[in-house]
Amino acid sequence: MNSLPLLSLIVFVPWAGALLLALLPRLSGGASRGLALVFSFSTLGLGITALSAFDPANTALQFVEKHAWIRALNVHYHLGLDGLSLVLVLLTGLIAPVALFGTARAARQSALYAALFLFLQGSALGVFLAQDFFPWFIFWELSLVPAFFLVKMWGGPGATRAAYQFVIYTIGGSAFMLLAFAALYAATGTFDFVQLAALARDGQLNDALKHLGTFWPQVVFLGVLLGLAVKVPLFPFHTWLPSAYAEAPTGASMFLTGVLSKMGVYGFLRLLWPLFPTQLHAAAPCLVWLAVAGVVLGAYAALKQTDLKRMIAYSSINHLSYCLLALFAVSAVYGRAGEAQAAALSGAILQMFNHGLSAAALFFCAGILEARAGRRGLNDFGGVRTAAPVFAALCGISMFSSLGLPGLNGFVGEFLIFRGVFGLTPWAAAVSTLGLLATALFLLTFWQRVFHGPAAGGGIAFRDLDSEEIITLLPLIALMFVLGLLPQLLAGLINPLVNAWVAQIPLQ
């Protein structure tokens, strides 16, 4: 297995597919779609190969590939996989082909659409696997290019503004992060995440930054924090997200919320958590408030929306804020309640995966409503359940998964997060339950207005799902049940890693 560059294949096979489609612009729509699906499914196939040989008990990086790249700057091509990365690789391997299969058929210029989608897929995988800041940042920034064009070229009436807003916000945050890592390199001479984390554990990273100036550890921490906060997004840096998700074409919305939004949370766990434990602990009381604001205000903002895609977009802010709440709560109480800390961190990772499934399914359902009726307003439909019972059933399961109904996947992550946060910062958990209430209100309002009552508006003669649409939703729905009933299938991959993180938490 060591002779096979498995992680490089995971990253670059989708890019190879994108290049092939770009070199075959005259390929028919069906052929380009089929070719794109083959390359997109490679991530799931290679991810399962990695899973079969992965040892969860080994918390060090596995399948490591490390080669000198730019010797003058001590830059390495360094890829590695642990439980956190593996979960996100598997999530990407599920969401990307499902989104392509369900939406590429209706896209104009299907070869270009599929090529950009594959390029986006490979870039996200590079972020999840790179262990040196130089290649990691290249993947991070390259993901903006296909996302921008997917939103701008195939999006709705406000797509151009939304695409530019998305890129400007993200590049602005990335500029702060780039400057912060330039300072880290000046202080330590390395971009390697593993080496930087080891220096941070020994206290040497803080000392090295203080040689640049007394307040440099705090300045560098803030730079990395801003870059990641925009990407998640952390309240109040969230204002780009509703427009981008709502105006994006359905497939891009599915990938943006299902995978790309996880890049920010991943960065918090991979960079901020191990490199700046002292600064994160000091800032945690303020950051917990911002996470609570994202949980509560995101849900209540969703409650006020009449555009279904904007409703789901604000719901994503709410759900991702749960992950940040868990991380910041753990950081706020170093040296206490190890079991609660482990529950919160495990819940955050499970929430990332489970939200990816439910949010992608909901965006696909909103896309079906818009494609059938030419509109997507909350009050534009009525009685869809009578006309399209299969669609109503599958969309309803997705809603209840997002709501966190016991027995479905969404429950497990939220339960563990609240279990952990209640043991760490009880007031934050108590206030955040208001977000749970608002989530129930807006999802049940969605269900009642669109699917029940007499047929009206877009619900009149609404056509039920065809076979391709059913095939698109079924894998996501099946996993909602499987992971709701057997969460240990996913938790078993991350529990040893989370326990290792908790054991390294400072005692002060």
Image (cartoon, helix red, strand yellow):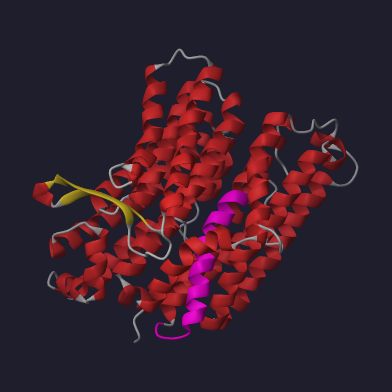
Image x and y of residue 16, in percent: 36, 29
Residue 352 belongs to magenta span: yes
Residue 441 belongs to magenta span: no
Q: Is residue 54 left or right of residue 441?
A: left
Quadrant placement of the C terminus: bottom left
Most foreground residue, 395 or 250: 395
Q: Do we see residue 142 in this rendering? A: yes
Q: Is residue 365 above or below residue 59?
A: above
Most foreground residue, 149 or 201: 201
Q: Is residue 455 left or right of residue 28?
A: right
The residue stretch that appears in magenta: 334-358
Image x and y of residue 49, in percent: 44, 45
Instruction: Give the main secondary structure of the magenta stretch.
Output: helix
Most foreground residue, 348 or 109: 348
Image x and y of residue 108, in percent: 55, 21
Image x and y of residue 61, in percent: 32, 58
User: In the rendered image, which quarter is residue 158 located in?
Assistant: top right
